[in-house]
Image (tube, rainbow, N blue to C red):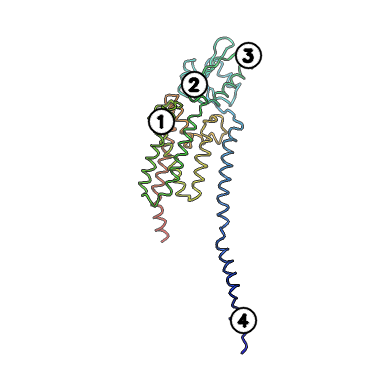
């Protein structure tokens, strides 16, 4: 009997062919998707590009913009305003004492007054940042040279001896932000171990511990940050909480990409625009606009106010840190309810 064309015996593969076909299918199934290769690489490239662009780019060509200066005398304020233009914001003062008062309360970063015929006296606040005060001195020197006047300079709010470059506040804020970021990242993996309220207690308690350790080391132990210890602890605890809750929030809502976003927001853009390594008055317009709104920038300002200016303008930065921590915590607390509503709607 003749076997029909296309019968089962002809369509069946030999055992070796079947094994080879199975091997190819198995290899294709094991091949990782393109996204597994692409996503980590793209994220790493974005992070390194943003880091270098922020830290190097912002310091590449710093230019003063509306740097506040108190100026005394009937004619000198107008002359300074005309000579220096948009680089400074002139605050007319009734006398040298009023100008110094504004300087000591951080309403301005320098005070300029006449000191006899052909002489000017410039008072600066070194604690306002070496980059800012250096620019102010250069601007005033240029004006004085053109006007044929001599300038004497006095630092009336100097940096502490153990922070000669004025970077202790920046490094403290960076370290606390990094610790809060690590805390929030680790808390993402505890969802199956700890209840939400227990994770909140962990973040809050650990943030307080971070702030306490940082304040004690930089303050009483090293003497680099002369702020009162208790207000400094609370400020740094708020910074750690803002970083921790924000990191956990972004990781919870955005998934795997949340941690890189938190890295860019807090550790890269936030620290680069904090106004410590380069004064906020010297930043480009966009960076200056967000500087005080991000947790690191708010913390650097609060540390400076607490350390050198009798907490004159510390309330605003502290409120900013509080809002970051509180809003992030609130959104995390609402997450389970939002998920329940989404599940109920799709059912």
x 61%, y 90%: residue: 1
The residue nearer to you, when weighing 198 against 59, is 198
Q: Which residue is mark 4?
A: 6
The residue nearer to you, when weighing 94 against 2, is 2
Q: Furthest residue to the bottom?
A: 1
The tag earlier along the polypeptide, 1 or 3, is 3
State which quadrant residue 20 falls in: bottom right
The mark lying in front, picked from 1 and 2, is: 1
State the image coordinates of residue 224 (x, y, percent, origin top left): 46, 26
- State the separation of the CA atoms marked 4 and 3: 107 Å
Q: Is residue 30 above or below residue 117?
A: below
The numbered mark at residue 148 is: 3
The mark lying in front, picked from 1 and 4, is: 1
State the image coordinates of residue 173 (x, y, percent, origin top left): 47, 34
State which quadrant residue 151 falls in: top right
- State the separation of the CA atoms marked 2 and 3: 28 Å
The numbered mark at residue 158 is: 2
Secondary structure found at label 4: loop
The mark lying in front, picked from 2 and 4, is: 4
Secondary structure found at label 1: helix
Q: Which residue is mark 1?
A: 216
Q: Furthest residue to the front?
A: 16
How packed is label 3: few (under 14 Cα within 10 Å), some, or many (20 or more)? few
């Amino acid at each position: 009997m003749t076997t029909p064309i296309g019968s089962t015996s002809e369509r069946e593969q030999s055992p070796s062919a079947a094994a080879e076909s199975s091997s190819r299918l198995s290899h294709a199934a094991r091949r990782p998707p393109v996204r597994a290769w692409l996503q980590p690489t793209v994220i790493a490239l974005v992070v390194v590009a943003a880091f270098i662009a922020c830290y190097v780019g912002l310091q590449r060509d710093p230019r003063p913009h509306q740097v506040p200066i108190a100026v005394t005398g009937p004619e000198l304020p107008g002359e300074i305003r005309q000579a220096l233009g948009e680089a400074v914001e002139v605050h007319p003062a009734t006398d040298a004492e009023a100008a110094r008062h504004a300087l000591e309360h951080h309403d301005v970063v320098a005070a300029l007054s006449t000191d006899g015929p052909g002489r000017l006296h410039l008072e600066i606040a070194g604690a306002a940042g070496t980059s800012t005060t250096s620019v102010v001195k250069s601007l005033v020197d240029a004006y004085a040279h053109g006007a044929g006047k001599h300038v004497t300079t006095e630092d009336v709010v100097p940096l502490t001896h153990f922070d000669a470059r004025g970077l202790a506040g920046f490094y403290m804020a960076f370290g606390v932000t990094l610790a809060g970021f690590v805390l929030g990242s680790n808390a993402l993996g505890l969802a199956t171990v700890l209840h939400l309220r227990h994770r909140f207690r962990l973040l809050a308690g650990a943030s307080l511990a971070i702030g306490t350790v940082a304040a004690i080391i930089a303050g009483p132990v090293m003497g680099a940050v002369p702020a009162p210890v208790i207000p400094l602890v609370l400020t740094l605890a708020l910074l750690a909480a803002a970083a921790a809750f924000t990191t956990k929030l972004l990781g919870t809502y955005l998934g795997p990409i949340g941690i890189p976003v938190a890295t860019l927001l807090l550790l890269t853009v936030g620290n680069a625009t904090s106004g410590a390594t380069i004064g906020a008055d010297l930043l480009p317009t966009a960076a200056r606009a967000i500087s005080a709104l991000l947790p690191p920038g708010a913390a650097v300002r609060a540390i400076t106010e607490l350390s050198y200016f009798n907490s004159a303008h510390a309330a605003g930065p502290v409120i900013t840190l509080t809002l970051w921590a509180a809003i992030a915590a609130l959104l995390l607390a609402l997450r389970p309810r939002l998920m329940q509503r989404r599940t109920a709607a799709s059912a």
